[in-house]
Image: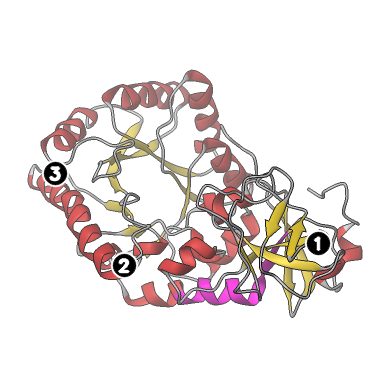
Amino acid sequence: MIRANQPHIENLIGRPIHELDSPALLLDLAASDRNIAQLSQFFSDKHAQLRPHFKNHKCSTLARRQLDAGSAVGITCAKLGEAEILADNGFNDILIANQIVGDIKLRRLSDVAQKTNVTVAIDHLEQARTLSQMASATNITVGVLVEVDIGMNRCGIEPGNAALELTQKIQPLPGIYFNGLQAYEGHLVNLEDATERQVQSHQDMQLAIDTRRMIEAAGIPVNTLSGCSTATYDMTGIMAGVDEVQAGTYATMDCTYHKLRPELEMALTIICTVISCHGGNAVLDVGVKGASGEFGSPIIADHPDAQIPNFCSEEHCVVQHISGLHVGDKVQMIPSHACTTCNLYHQLHVHQDQHIVDIWPIEASGLLT
């Protein structure tokens, strides 16, 4: 998909990034590749394998590069619409790390399951029953992971006996098979102190591991415990009993996650134009409609002293204490949250040495269902 205000792709290849109309989403190919290689290498000799999270970038080309790098068992996504995109692009092992509820979505899930191997998360018997009815009626098989709440207080059943009882109840249901557990320590991934993040994430993930052992002791095999994140890949991702790491942000990174994982490079930026300069301030042509702000203000690359104290305008960004800029200049903004920023764009302008080398569609941008 090509934005209407940009020239055709073939006319952009080889051009400097500052010639792009703005705002436009950029990916530094070398930096992204190094991030991907780093996590692939880390897990090359570990028990756990990567299951990269598509929700970060929603771009099938980038997802394929993550899988091709090795150490990956499949792909994770957050929405059924993302799974449909992945299935249409030939991905053959998809985990929807979410609950699928409602007749419309169940029919869509059936279509996905007829194209590829798909697993979904459940945390309630009613979800399993409706999945079973759909699968039986359409002659398909769907894997399920029982989601265990280890402190996120979002979806998930309580660890221990409650998870065991749900697992036991779904065993006889036709058309679905219990493949294991899902547990996400998302309530801890933003702890900036690495030692505190490690201690607390170990403590909470152990709840899921203990639940796994309880289910196995009851005679039910647990093939997979899937969870973790970019912020905890080398913490919970190496615990005995954890099989899959659903890291997402590592492929692109942002200024929030870079504080947590400084060894990974910020590969995602937005090219912006200075549209006004007054009293030491520069105004850029992108606001919250072009860079998400729920994790705080973005930063400006190569301008460490610049400040964005109030990032809330729809189409403008006022940057303070930034010198040497003039109306018409281009700068690169680093968003505070890559996932919700990628969701705002239709394409990634891939560059090396500040020149465009490719343009990748973000096929799942804007998909909410």
Q: Nearer the viewer, mark 1 or mark 3?
A: 1
Which residue is under mark 1? Answer: 277
Which residue is under mark 2? Answer: 193
Marks 1/2: CA distance? 38 Å
Q: Earlier in the sequence, mark 1 or mark 3?
A: 3
**Closest to the observer: 308 or 228?**
308
Local crowd size for mark 3, using a 10 Å CA cut-off: few (<14), some (14–19), many (≥20) = many
- Amino acid type, mark 2: Asp
Q: Nearer the viewer, mark 2 or mark 3?
A: 2
Q: Earlier in the sequence, mark 1 or mark 2?
A: 2
Q: Please tell me which residue is depicted at 33% across the width and 35% down the height of the picture.
A: 155
Query: Is residue 158 covered in magenta?
Result: no
Q: Which residues are magenta?
A: 25-38
- Residue 215 disc label: 3
Residue 162 visible in the picture: yes
- Chief SS of the magenta region: helix
User: Which x, y percent locates residue 359?
Assistant: 76, 61
- Amino acid type, mark 3: Ile
User: Which x, y percent locates residue 350?
Assistant: 72, 67
The answer to whether residue 265 is left or right of residue 191 is right
**Closest to the observer: 106 or 354?**
354
